Amino acid sequence: MAEIQDESLSEPDPAEGRVAPGAAPRRHRKAHTTQRDLARYAGLFAKRTQVMRSSAMRDLMEITARPEVISLAGGLPDTSTFSPQSFARQMTKIAQESSAEALQYGPTEGFASTKECIRQVMVAEGMDPDPDDIVVTTGGQQAIDLACKALVDPGDVVIAEAPTYPGAVPVFCSYEAETVQVEMDSEGMRVDLLEETLERLAAEGRRPKLIYTVPSFQNPAGVTMSLERRRRLVEVARERELLVLEDNPYGLLRYEGDPLPTLYELDGGDYVLYLGTFSKILSPGLRLGWLCAPPPVLPKIVLGKQASDLCTSTLSQYFVDEFFAEGSWREYVDELCGVYRTRRDAMLESLERHFPPEATWSEPEGGLFLWATLPEFIDTTDLLARALRDNVAFVPGVAAFADGLTGKSSMRLNFSGSTEAEIREGIRRIGSVIAEQMALYGAITREQPSLGGDRAQARGLTPSVGSDPGGDVVPIRRREPEA
Ligand code: PMP
């Protein structure tokens, strides 16, 4: 520490704009950290920082916040659909009737009244949790973090789908987990392959700490796990006494088809930890989610939460309580479903129009995303750089893989955060950037950039895995060749 103080604080360095101790603090930091800055602090960082990864969506947010950019990248719900009058009414009521309490700390587990709202949301999806099994968290994201904090030691295996929620990858990395991803198809995670993976790991004496899954309208693939697979997954967890982390932010955002039971319902809450959030059915700005865990696990989660933030925002919990007290939360969710259904359809239509016939994509029955896969010579990270020049953004597929390599010809597209017109224009722009890349490829190789061969085996079903195109993975329902 002394070394650092000597080096960085006590020696004024006008070139770098530093000031002597005791002087007024600088008002502005330099925009970029220099190599020298990094070297100065290097000895202080925890080892885990070497494997920590940034979230692709967060990285993109600065760019996509610019008004001229059409962002199909983030997972933003359309918060403009929430009535400002209703917001003002609820907040005014809180200020008038419960100001001191709403501005105070609260219990780490969350308020009983908020847990009752959570119970209502879970009942709407066929579950009936014991409120004592629930902890209210700072978003679903914290629930993933707390589950890992309680269960994962460095080097432990976490199983996830391939592709997986891009925001979970940095969590697994920061707990130094070894993330093993299991292929998906149009029925969700291939539970047969999961079993093979578990066998292989068992032969190595390894027992995964968590099987992380988003069974409904998966982020990013947009696929939903079939009932048969759900049943088998729960059986596998029971037979092998493994914990599943079911992440279900989108279950109520169904635009067609019949609801399916959650893993938590099928299991009864013994081996399945269940994660929910108000972010997509109400507002992500509230930062309010929850985790249901079996009684032996929950206290560890609560201890982890105490250490990280003491309690979830009291004000947000009061707001949810007020909103639910008005009794029309289901109507609001129905309204959202109507808006997002139309936007999903607009995106599907535009893809059909503007993407090349070699591309494939999922056709989600709900949620906020679909997953598109392009011919494998197109790298979507490079494509994004080009697309941003045309003011349109998406999430490159590699963000959904812990190896940072797989999925490089795929992309996640969001259809909830933009208007229909923006979606159509955004897809048109991406389509023309793809066409440009394909023409370039054709010119360089003097080939028609066609996949050739049997399109029933379209490559979109299996994104290339680093140097191994046949490896782990993925989506989804294939687009039928045009007549
Ligand atoms: N899990 C999944 C699958 C998600 O898509 C998201 C948000 N996009 C989260 C967790 C985290 O959401 P929040 O923290 O806003 O509840």
Image (spheres, rainbow, N blue to C red):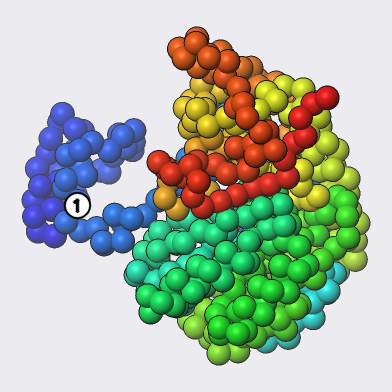
| Spot occupied by residue 399 in the image (x, y as percentages of width and height) | 50, 45
Q: How many labels does the image show?
A: 1
| Spot occupied by residue 416 in the image (x, y as percentages of width and height) | 74, 41
| Spot occupied by residue 104 in the image (x, y as percentages of width and height) | 60, 72
Q: Which residue is drawn at 88% across and 60% down?
A: 258
Other residues around mark 1 within 10 Å, as few (<14) / some (14–19) / many (≥20)? few
Q: Is residue 105 left or right of residue 255?
A: left
Asked whether residue 55 appears in the rendered view, the answer is yes
Q: Residue at x 62, y 55 (%)?
A: 184
| Spot occupied by residue 218 in the image (x, y as percentages of width and height) | 67, 54
Q: Residue at x 50, y 37 (%)?
A: 408
User: For disc 1, does the CB lie below 8 Å from ligand 1?
Assistant: no
Query: Which part of the image, by quadrant, shows the C terminus?
Result: top right
Q: Nearer the viewer, residue 225 or 449?
A: 449
In the displayed structure, would residue 85 be above or below residue 422? below
| Residue, disc 1 | 42
Q: Which of 237 and 418 is in front in this view?
A: 237
Give amino acid for label 1: Ala
**Circle 1 sits in a helix, a strand or a loop, which is it?**
helix
Q: Residue at x 75, y 36 (%)?
A: 479
